[in-house]
């Protein structure tokens, strides 16, 4: 058994156990006023007629039924094609911030994903690539967390249980990719599906609520409209888009020498 | 041989009350700072997402390391049967617990969610060295408390086996505890400045030094307060030798650690940063940790004579060793974080999140007050214990002259 399969793996039921009482993709503060009843009824009728189609589209073939635990049969991963990642583009960062309601002071704001400019020391060629939680198979952040708040889901997504995070920041010390942020102040207008707590640690969730609903992470969706540098999928499925892409061209994990086996791969990083 | 007698502190002098008042003010400032940080968030500190552990951790780790070393005197008397130290074993045990509580208080008060600290009892992750340390700290307090009981209880104190058992257990436990504290840093695979097994022995050597320095200063303070010569001529000579030995060991291990990393190509850059190019960090290292913190007090000990009249040199050396300890923790904790992580080997990285750049850290006043209050919490706990428990040995006049 690999280290990744030990007791820190958690079979978390789809979405609800991770973030209680939320509807994937919903926004806070939306509600019906009394004057809009007629419009509401029209909308309800339309929704009744088109809902099945929407449901099929949103909760697609990859959606996991609510209550069903995540499975080790799946390992979610990302592929970053550096050749397609434009230095001037930050669509993935903007999409992540919008999806997860990330705001803050410039000095201490959270960055779940960031664009890193890379200057090849040998060739002087300048590239760019996004860095986010690498969703390691053997995540150091999970190893060091005293309460088990840092945990890895059975499907490889590394998360923070904010109910038992004590804010010691040892995971931030241990992460080789500086992928975690500490919430330094209170935040209003949070996204209901991505609650943030002052004094706790957070990081890329791989848009777990979206993934559980059969959607792709927000960064991947945004990138597809730009350069299409991000590929998301099941690393365990030989037929998935990401597995095919990984077979097509060589890709590397960041700091592979550390042996933490990241779930994020970088192609054409040279 | 006459039975050793102990007494409680009763009447306090004005200088002693002044010390208590100053420590009380420091604790009040620390508590106010902790409340301020918790209500406003850590955004009011100099800590950020690059430097996640700051000045409070420098003080906290320093106190925790010193705590295990404060048990030296007790260990030497019970484990190594050096009878000259025996009268001070109780004081040594009390100080060890006080320093540990002082350090842990700061560590807890600096948590993002300090009110959740008890969750660590119900949610355990046994792969976490942090989780191990929670048990090591708790076990240390329990063992030393048992040790003190064995020394103070009329019936048990007559049975040398009881003291020996607790003495040995506490001695072994304290070595494991400091190994655990050093390993908090040594286990960080991505932090080139501190990763490595040598962190544990460095912390053990440092703990012996800082713990003994604290003990010496408290003993000298109690000598003044009780108008009793607690530090006999013989004891001063022994403290001098032990401090020099521990300081030399700390210096040698520190030298080996840095030379090893200077020799290995992947860690040359971080070493040059800490030792030469890193701005504040080489200054703190060379002047604070090595110069004022180790070499200067070693020189002071070398020139002093083993006489009771030279307590000033012993006190001065002890203060400098403690100053050096804080400098050491600053370099180990802050310096290690300031150096950027090498996420993309072979590339010069830059980003809005500090990639490839040296992180800046400017500690704020609340952080300093929170940190320094740990020392005062420890001193107030020790003072209270000296008043409530028979800890201070009564030294006979003819012994003092010996």
Image (cartoon, coloured by chain):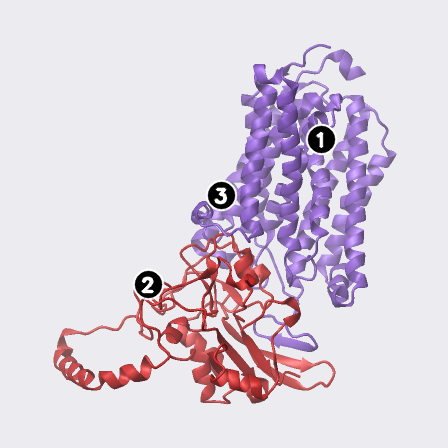
> Which residue occupies the foreground of this view, A241 or B150?
A241
The x and y percentages for residue B32 are 48, 45
Q: Are marks 1 and 3 in contact (CB under 8 Å)?
A: no
- Residue A107 against residue B310 in the figure, above or below: below
Q: How crowded is mark 1: few (under 14 residues within 10 Å), some or many (20 or more)?
A: many
For label 1, the residue is B216
Element type at mark 1: helix
* Quarter that holds the N terminus of chain B: top right
Whichever of labels 1 and 3 marks the residue nearer the N terminus, that label is 3
Residue lying at the far front in this picture: please name it. A1
The chain ID associated with circle 2 is: A
In three-dimensional space, the C-alpha distance between marks 3 and 2, rounded to whole angstroms, equals: 34 Å
Question: Could one spot residue B20 in this view of the protein?
Answer: no
The label nearer to you, 3 versus 2, is: 2
Element type at mark 2: loop
- Residue B230 against residue A230 in the figure, above or below: above
For label 2, the residue is A20
- Note the chain letter of the red one: A
Q: Residue at coordinates 18% horizontally, 82% vertically from top-left?
A: A48
For label 3, the residue is B31
- Residue B9 against residue A64 in the figure, above or below: above
* Quarter that holds the C terminus of chain B: top right
In three-dimensional space, the C-alpha distance between marks 1 and 3, rounded to whole angstroms, equals: 28 Å
Element type at mark 3: helix
């Amino acid at each position: 058994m690999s280290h990744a399969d030990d007791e820190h793996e958690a079979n978390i039921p789809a979405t609800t156990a991770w973030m209680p009482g939320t509807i994937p993709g919903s926004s806070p503060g939306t509600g019906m006023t009394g004057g809009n009843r007629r419009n509401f009824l029209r909308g309800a009728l339309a929704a009744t007629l088109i809902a099945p189609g929407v449901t099929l589209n949103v909760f697609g073939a990859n959606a996991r039924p609510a209550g069903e635990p995540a499975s080790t049969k799946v390992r979610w991963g990302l592929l970053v094609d550096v050749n397609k990642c434009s230095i001037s583009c930050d669509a993935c960062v903007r999409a992540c911030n919008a999806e997860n309601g990330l705001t803050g002071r410039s000095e201490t704001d959270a960055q779940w994903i960031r664009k890193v400019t890379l200057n090849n020391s040998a060739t002087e060629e300048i590239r760019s690539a996004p860095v986010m939680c690498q969703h390691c198979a053997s995540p150091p952040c999970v190893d060091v967390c005293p309460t088990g708040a840092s945990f890895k889901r059975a499907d490889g997504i590394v998360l923070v249980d904010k109910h038992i995070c004590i804010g010691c920041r040892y995971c931030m010390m241990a992460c080789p990719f500086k992928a975690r942020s500490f919430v330094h102040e209170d935040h209003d207008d949070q996204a209901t599906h991505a609650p943030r707590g002052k004094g706790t640690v957070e990081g890329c969730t791989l848009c777990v609520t979206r993934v559980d609903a059969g959607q792709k992470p927000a960064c991947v969706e945004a990138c597809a409209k730009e350069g299409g540098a991000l590929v998301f999928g099941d690393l365990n499925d030989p037929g998935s888009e990401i597995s095919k892409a990984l077979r097509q061209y060589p890709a590397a994990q960041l700091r592979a020498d550390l042996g933490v086996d990241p779930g994020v791969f970088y192609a054409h990083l040279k | 041989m006459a039975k050793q007698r102990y007494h409680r502190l009763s009447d306090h002098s004005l200088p002693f009350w002044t010390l208590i008042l100053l420590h009380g003010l420091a604790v009040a400032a620390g508590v106010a700072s902790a409340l301020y940080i918790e209500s406003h968030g850590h955004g009011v500190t100099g800590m950020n997402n690059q430097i996640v552990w700051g000045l409070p951790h420098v003080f906290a780790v320093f106190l925790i390391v010193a705590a295990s070393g404060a048990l030296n005197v007790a260990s030497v008397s019970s484990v190594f049967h050096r009878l000259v130290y025996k009268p001070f074993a109780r004081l040594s045990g009390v100080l060890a617990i006080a320093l540990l509580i002082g350090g842990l208080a700061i560590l807890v008060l600096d948590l993002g969610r300090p009110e959740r600290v008890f969750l660590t009892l119900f949610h355990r992750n046994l792969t976490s060295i942090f989780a191990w340390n929670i048990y090591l700290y708790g076990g240390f307090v329990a063992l030393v408390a048992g040790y003190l009981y064995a020394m103070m209880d009329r019936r048990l104190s007559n049975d040398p086996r009881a003291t020996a058992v607790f003495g040995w257990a506490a001695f072994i436990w304290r070595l494991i505890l400091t190994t655990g504290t050093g390993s908090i840093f040594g286990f960080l695979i991505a932090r080139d400045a501190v990763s490595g097994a040598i962190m544990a022995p460095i912390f053990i050597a440092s703990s012996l030094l800082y713990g003994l320095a604290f003990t010496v200063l408290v003993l000298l303070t109690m000598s003044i307060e009780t108008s009793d010569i607690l530090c006999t001529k013989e004891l001063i000579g022994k403290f001098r030798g032990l401090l020099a030995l521990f300081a030399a060991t700390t210096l040698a291990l520190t030298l080996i650690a840095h030379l090893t990393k200077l020799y290995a190509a992947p860690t040359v850059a971080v070493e040059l940063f800490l030792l030469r190019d890193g701005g504040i960090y080489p200054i703190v290292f060379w002047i604070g940790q090595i110069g004022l913190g180790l070499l200067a007090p070693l020189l002071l000990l070398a020139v002093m004579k083993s006489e009771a009249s030279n307590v000033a040199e012993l006190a001065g050396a002890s203060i400098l060793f403690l100053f050096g300890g804080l400098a050491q923790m600053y370099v180990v904790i802050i310096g290690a974080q300031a150096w950027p992580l090498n996420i993309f080997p072979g590339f010069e990285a830059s980003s809005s999140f500090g990639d490839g750049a040296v992180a800046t850290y400017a500690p704020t006043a609340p952080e300093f007050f929170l940190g320094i209050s740990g020392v005062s919490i420890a001193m107030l706990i020790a003072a209270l214990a000296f008043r409530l428990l028979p800890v201070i040995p009564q030294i006979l006049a003819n012994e003092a002259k010996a």
